[in-house]
């Protein structure tokens, strides 16, 4: 079954700097998009594009170069033009997240094009008029201009999330401490804290219940219990050593 992402075209119109084409290819590749279409680029192919692609050279090799936007949009079920500037005659305007959801939904009918304009002026009114929907990236209204590759990265990310969700990698699960492990820790803590005078078993108050609450909230792993008990054991050993007779301590130190 074809992935919806395979039916998304990224269309760049009249790109002036070839480095932006390479950066766009990299942005696409990180999000699983592979269809790059260039409309009348000023310089392509170009070493700057290759240098900025960083691992996405295959996208540049497969990029389609068209003379006009109409050629780039041929066969699409939907074209979404990106613009930060309000246009008087713009059609339906959506935030990029909503536009990405609609783009993925419409891939069931065919390919969908996400169209980006020139670095200096963006899409012209005539180019935007060829798109059935306008998407905009909510940004600082005092400075909403984005580098074209950065805009593609945002759009590609939202499109990926719309298609596949936002599942992320997980750290490996370690063995959880058992009830017996925790009870042994509580008992060890009570003995050590009493021995150093921090806890008075005759007047227990709420110290140990609060420690129980703390350990329960931490959801300790078995190895973490071992670490804590190792610390307690070291405190126990230091206390025994410090209470040893002076001549015994001297003998121990001389053996080191």
Image (cartoon, rainbow, N blue to C red):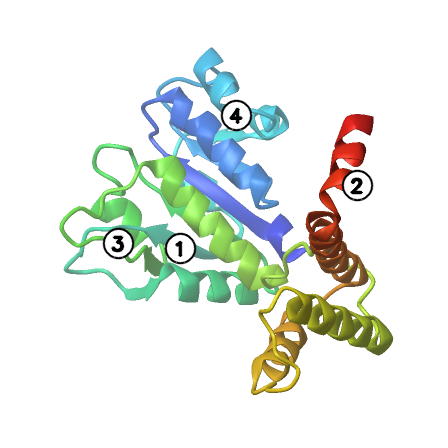
Spatial separation of the CA atoms under disc 2 and disc 1: 84 Å
Is 191 above or below relative to 209?
above
> Is residue 133 rendered to the left or right of residue 244?
left
Residue 165 figure quarter: bottom right
Contact (Cβ within 8 Å) of mark 4 with mark 1: no
Residue pointed to by mark 1: 80
**Which is nearer the N-term, disc 2 or disc 4?**
4
Residue pointed to by mark 2: 248
Q: Position of residue 238 (x, y in %)?
A: 70, 49
Q: Position of residue 31 (x, y in %)?
A: 57, 46
Say which mark, if any, is on residue 53. Answer: 4
**Which is nearer the N-term, disc 2 or disc 1?**
1
Spatial separation of the CA atoms under disc 1 and disc 3: 18 Å
Give the crowd class for mark 1: few <14, some 14-19, many >=20 residues within 10 Å: many
> Is residue 41 rendered to the left or right of residue 193?
left
**Which is nearer the N-term, disc 1 or disc 3?**
1
Of marks 3 and 4, the one in the foreground: 3
Asked if residue 33 can be seen in this view, the reply is yes
17 or 74: nearer the viewer: 17
Say which mark, if any, is on residue 139. Answer: 3
Q: Secondary structure at mark 3?
A: loop
């Amino acid at each position: 079954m074809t992935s919806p992402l395979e039916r998304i075209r990224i269309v760049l119109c009249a790109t002036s700097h070839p480095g932006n084409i390479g950066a766009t290819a990299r942005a696409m590749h990180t999000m699983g998009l592979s269809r790059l279409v260039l409309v009348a680029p000023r310089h392509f192919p170009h070493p700057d594009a290759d240098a900025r692609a960083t691992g996405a050279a295959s996208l540049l090799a497969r990029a389609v170069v068209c003379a006009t936007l109409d050629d780039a949009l041929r066969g699409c079920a939907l074209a979404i033009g990106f613009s930060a500037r309000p246009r008087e005659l713009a059609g339906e305007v959506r935030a990029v997240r909503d536009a990405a959801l609609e783009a993925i939904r419409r891939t069931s009918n065919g390919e969908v094009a996400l169209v980006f304009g020139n670095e200096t002026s963006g899409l012209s009114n005539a180019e935007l008029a060829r798109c059935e929907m306008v998407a905009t990236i909510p940004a600082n209204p005092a400075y909403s201009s984005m580098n074209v590759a950065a805009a593609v990265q945002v759009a590609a990310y939202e499109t990926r999330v719309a298609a596949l969700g936002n599942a992320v990698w997980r750290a490996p699960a370690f063995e959880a401490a058992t009830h017996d492990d925790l009870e042994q820790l509580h008992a060890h803590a009570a003995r050590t804290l009493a021995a150093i005078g921090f806890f008075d078993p005759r007047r227990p108050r709420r110290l140990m219940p609060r420690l129980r609450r703390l350990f329960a909230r931490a959801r300790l792993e078995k190895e973490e219990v071992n670490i804590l008990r190792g610390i307690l054991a070291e405190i126990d050993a230091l206390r025994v050593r410090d209470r040893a007779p002076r001549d015994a301590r001297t003998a121990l130190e001389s053996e080191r």
